Image: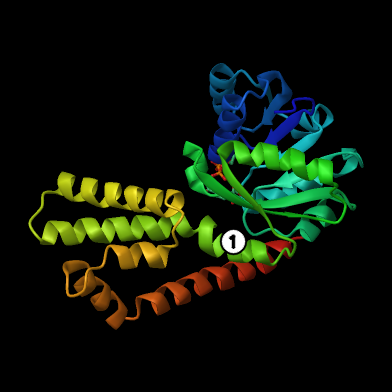
Amino acid sequence: MENKSIIGFIGAGNMAYALIKGLLDNGFDAECINISDPNEELLNERQSELKVRTFSNNMALLSSSDIIIFAVKPQKLSSVCLELKENVKSNHLFVSIVAGIKGSDINRWLGGSFSLVRTMPNTPALFQHGVTGLFANELVNNEQKILVTSILSSVGECFWVNDEKLIDAITAISGSGPAYFFLLIQSMSQAAMALGLDEKTANSLSIQTSYGASLMASKSGKDAKTLRAEVTSPNGTTQAAIESFQDQNFEGIVASATRAAYDRARELSNELGEIE
Ligand SMILES: NC(=O)c1ccc[n+]([C@@H]2O[C@H](COP(=O)([O-])OP(=O)(O)OC[C@H]3O[C@@H](n4cnc5c(N)ncnc54)[C@H](OP(=O)(O)O)[C@@H]3O)[C@@H](O)[C@H]2O)c1
């Protein structure tokens, strides 16, 4: 990976950790990574494990970094930006991994029009199997997009969209999506126990089945509908289960659940953006 720009993470929590691990595993130089966080103990932990430069002050990090990655909780982002406002330079590139905050609100808090990429990663990034949706504002050039792709692709796949509203759709599918699969795994484990299997076996069967099915969907080159048809023999056990799912409108349940997540993402985005 090109390793000239200094990347500064504001917030040293879970997502920053996942991204930094991914960058280091992909050959990025630890000396080119800065992190800031108010939690001294966490900073020391990160420093000793990752060997990155740490700052207890966001302004000091800003002046020593070219790319600033916002990795704080959504409620903290306005105060972080307002704190940086006086010292932001036009050549800084900002990347937000913060859920729900629009680029225009970040730029308003920063006090100008800056190059900004808004992203929506997901938690499997912690195991470098994430997927991230990205949107760049009109000031981001191609070289910067390539750079941001190289950062986020260190923890999984990247998909750029050209309409910021689609980030809310991505939030509803892959951002919140891991929880939908956890719910399915949990439901299958409970069902397995109801059929007489012990808890450990029930959990392992459910988890491994979900992992194996995802692997097949990703590697076989066949779409999910085809794969499902291939394992559904007429009048067999799988058909009995699929018919039961569909009698209860499984597709409709998934559609309304993801719509609810999308609507909530838009609501949150409006609420959080109201902060002056
Ligand atoms: N985890 C996910 O699944 C996921 C997925 C997609 C997007 N995201 C987004 O990623 C962002 C970070 O999530 P996370 O799970 O990494 O959160 P996290 O583990 O809570 O990390 C955030 C860190 O920021 C620190 N912080 C608070 N105020 C700060 C300030 N003023 N300056 C610098 N650092 C500050 C926090 O310290 P304290 O704990 O002391 O406050 C904490 O260590 C969130 O906005 C979330 O929406 C997360």
Side of 170 where 61 appears, left or right? right
| Foreground pick, 99 / 127 | 127
The picture quadrant where one finds residue 262 is bottom right
Q: Is residue 79 above or below residue 155?
A: below
Residue 112, image x and y in percent? 90, 52
The picture quadrant where one finds residue 107 is bottom right
Side of 15 where 116 appears, left or right? right
Q: Secondary structure at mark 1?
A: helix
Residue 82, image x and y in percent? 80, 47
Res 83 visible: no
Which quarter shows the C terminus?
Answer: bottom right
Which quarter shows the N terminus?
Answer: top right
| Foreground pick, 143 / 202 | 143
Residue at image location 27% in from the left, 62% down from the top: 231
Q: Which residue is mark 1?
A: 170
Residue 177, image x and y in percent? 47, 58
Residue at image location 35% in from the left, 81% down from the top: 249
The answer to whether the beta carbon of the residue marked 1 is less than 8 Å from any atom of ligand 1 is no
Query: Disc 1 marks which amino acid?
Result: Ile
| Foreground pick, 74 / 174 | 174
Side of 115 where 134 appears, left or right? left
